[in-house]
């Protein structure tokens, strides 16, 4: 995991070497290099490993997904949305550069992400097209952005468990799920296998969000790098608020067991994926 994280960190540091505007590029890099677990790139690399494909083939795609994730965090922290002061232990982008630059930094990262893929000479034209289709679908109005709107509408409302799953699948899960789908495309896997990967990816995304809900109750600023308790403050429905803390943990562990079986059913070197699966439910931030 540390090896894969190091690869993506090293590549991200090479971006924006010739800025058109120093302020914009500095703001984008501020958030892009602010640390984080790099779960999404590592998931993509680990899935490529499952099929014996070289991680280098997925480097630009992994960077693109991380750029989209970073843009979403910059915008999510804005006063009009979650109004957060800290992210990963640092002041949020708009607190440092102002709301106007923060919005444009997010816009730049989102748009530049597709340039990363469209100019990737390690991939065929068909692969690039399929990757752009998959990622834009996962990130846009039918994916992550839709989930963010559903999440805002859910504030101060009591959702059913099925409604909450829909929010989670889109807001958090789609950008995690697409890492598996992209790896299948890059590794030239048949459609049946890609469908299996999509299902596993959806499980990973839901696991990640359930754990986030638990951490919002049990975590601390020192561990998480941001304020805990924001879900309670914003009166959001979560797995913990609907099921209680212990039942939320039981639901997470049951989903973990099902996901582990699905990974084991795939033929290939699955050690890295299983390690990541364990990391997601044991993490403290």
Image (cartoon, helix red, strand yellow):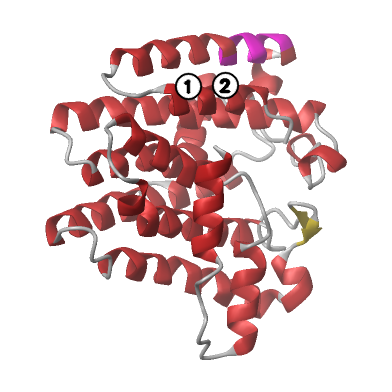
Labelled pair 2, 1 in contact (Cβ < 8 Å): yes
Tell me which residue sits at (58%, 16%) in the image: 252
Relative side of 90 to 39, left or right: right
Q: Which residue is mark 1?
A: 274
Boundaries of the magenta span = 246-252
Q: Quadrant of the N terminus?
A: top right
User: Does the rendering let one see residue 150?
Assistant: no
Q: Quadrant of residue 115?
A: bottom left
Q: Which residue is mark 2?
A: 278
Q: Secondary structure at mark 1?
A: helix
**What's the CA distance linking mark 2 and mark 1?**
6 Å
- In percent of width and height, residue 77 lies at 68, 58
Tell me which residue sits at (17%, 41%) in the image: 188
Magenta part mainly helix, strand or loop?
helix
- In percent of width and height, residue 106 lies at 55, 68
Tell me which residue sits at (20%, 27%) in the image: 193
């Amino acid at each position: 995991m540390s090896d894969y994280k190091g690869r993506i960190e090293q590549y991200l540091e090479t971006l924006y070497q010739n800025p058109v505007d120093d302020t914009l590029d500095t703001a984008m890099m501020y958030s892009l290099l602010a640390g984080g677990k790099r779960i999404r790139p590592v998931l993509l690399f680990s899935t490529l490993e499952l099929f014996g494909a070289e991680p280098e083939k997925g480097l630009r795609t992994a960077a693109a997904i991380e750029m989209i994730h970073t843009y979403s965090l910059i915008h999510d922290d804005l006063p009009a949305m979650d109004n957060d002061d800290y992210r990963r232990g640092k002041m949020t982008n708009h607190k440092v550069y102002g709301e106007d630059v923060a919005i444009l930094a997010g816009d730049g990262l989102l748009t530049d992400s597709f340039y990363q893929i469209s100019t990737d000479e390690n991939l065929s034209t068909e692969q690039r097209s399929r990757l752009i289709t998959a990622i834009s679908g996962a990130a846009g109005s039918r994916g992550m952005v839709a989930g963010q709107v559903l999440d805002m509408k859910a504030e101060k409302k009591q959702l059913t468990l099925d409604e909450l799953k829909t929010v989670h699948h889109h807001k958090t899960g789609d950008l995690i799920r697409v890492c598996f789908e992209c790896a299948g495309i890059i590794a030239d896997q048949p459609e049946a296998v890609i469908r299996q990967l999509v299902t596993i990816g959806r499980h990973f995304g839901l696991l990640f969000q359930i754990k986030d809900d638990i951490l919002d109750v049990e975590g601390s600023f020192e561990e998480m790098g941001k304020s805990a308790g924001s879900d309670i403050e914003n009166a959001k429905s979560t797995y913990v608020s609907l099921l209680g803390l212990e039942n939320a943990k039981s639901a997470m562990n049951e989903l973990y067991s099902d996901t582990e079986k699905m990974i084991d059913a795939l033929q290939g070197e699955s050690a890295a994926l299983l390690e990541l699966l364990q990391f997601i439910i044991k993490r403290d931030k």
